[in-house]
Image: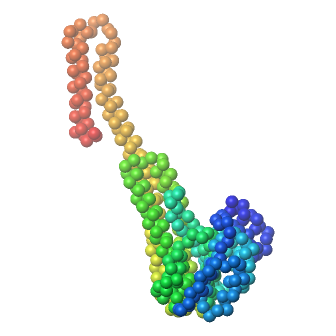
Amino acid sequence: MAGHKRSKKSGLPPGSMVHIGEKKLGKVKITMIDYDSKKFTEKPAKNPEECSTYRKKPTVTWINVSGIHDTALINDIGKCFNLHPLLLEDIVNTDQRPKMEDYGDYIFIVLKMLYPDKNENGIRAEQVSLVLGPDFLVSFQESEDDVFENTRERLRNRKGKIRDMGADFLAYSLIDAIVDNYFIVLEKMGEQVEHMEEELVKNPNPKTLQNIHKMKRQMIFVRKSVWPLRELINSLMRSESKIIKKSMLVYLRDVYDHTIQIIDNVETSRDMLSGMTDLYLSSISNRLNEIMKVLTIIGTIFIPLTFVTGLYGMNFRYMPELDSPVGYPAALFVMFVVAILMLLYFRKKKWI
């Protein structure tokens, strides 16, 4: 579906807004939060024009837009904040790679927000775009679900130093919330990997192999979301923009460290999943070898027994044992002794 919509952009001039991605919300919702160290205001906005009135205030303004499928409304919001058309084009394109771009008067940041998917036992992804200005932050999300509720609670209840800091600290808080949620996603995926390892050891089956391949695809997607994030944070740390104060470097370094930890965890999980495929093939091969060994032992034991029964099944007239009254039990006894001796020999060789 995304590829089909992307084809609509073919031949259009740069900056043409075409929504690429899944429509996750019926109606676009805009929420405004305006605050400083003493005052706090939170309310929904009916139209983009309400947002522009807060730009003239000497406070920090956070405009959160839930739903990016309405390109006309996104364009109106862009006009309120004088956003570049190429930036607006990237906002409505959910196939963007995490990145940071400095437009001079504001900084544009794209990230991937991940959630554990309880229904499908996987992960859900959502693109988040941040436009950071000197005293404002505009965030664009695909749906209302996010990981920013703790940040909102800190703003409402004046917890920590977030109300005393600027818009750059607010942007850091949102990025930090997204990065911290990666740990939760990786923890859930790690539990699934451990469960699959137990299945591989105890009872490997084709369904387990399917789960391994599914987990591999999810891990590749997480890797694609996390690896560019390291470059993004590094670019923010090295940015010469006046929008990001020097006091923010220590916080950005902390997020950078968390990003490196996440990348290490992702690489470790990928190595484990790669080894699990080999472990599955090895387990299946071992099971097949065990089955073949049992069948071979049974067949080997019956070879001399078959020889005896075949020898006495020829029905020649002058076979001395045929006329003996103990011929039949003697033959059974010989076959029994041969089978026992062969089992003892196999046991001595540790074949069974």
The reply to whether residue 98 is in sight is no
Q: Quadrant of residue 134?
A: bottom right
Pick the front one: 284 or 62: 62
Pick the front one: 310 or 200: 200
Q: Position of residue 22 (x, y in %)?
A: 66, 64
Pick the front one: 175 or 143: 143
Q: Position of residue 19 (x, y in %)?
A: 71, 68
Left or right: where 86 falls relative to 235: right
Residue at horizontal 56 percent and vertical 90 percent from the top = 39
Residue at horizontal 30 percent and vertical 14 percent from the top = 312
Give the quarter of the figure containing the C terminus.
top left
Q: Relative to 268, is 351 above or below?
A: above
Q: Position of residue 225 (x, y in %)?
A: 56, 70
Residue at horizontal 64 percent and vertical 92 percent from the top = 57
The reply to whether residue 37 is in sight is yes
Q: Relative to 308, is 58 above or below?
A: below
Left or right: where 75 falls relative to 335: right
The image's colour scheme reads rainbow
Q: Position of residue 307 (x, y in %)?
A: 31, 21
Q: Quadrant of residue 6?
A: bottom right
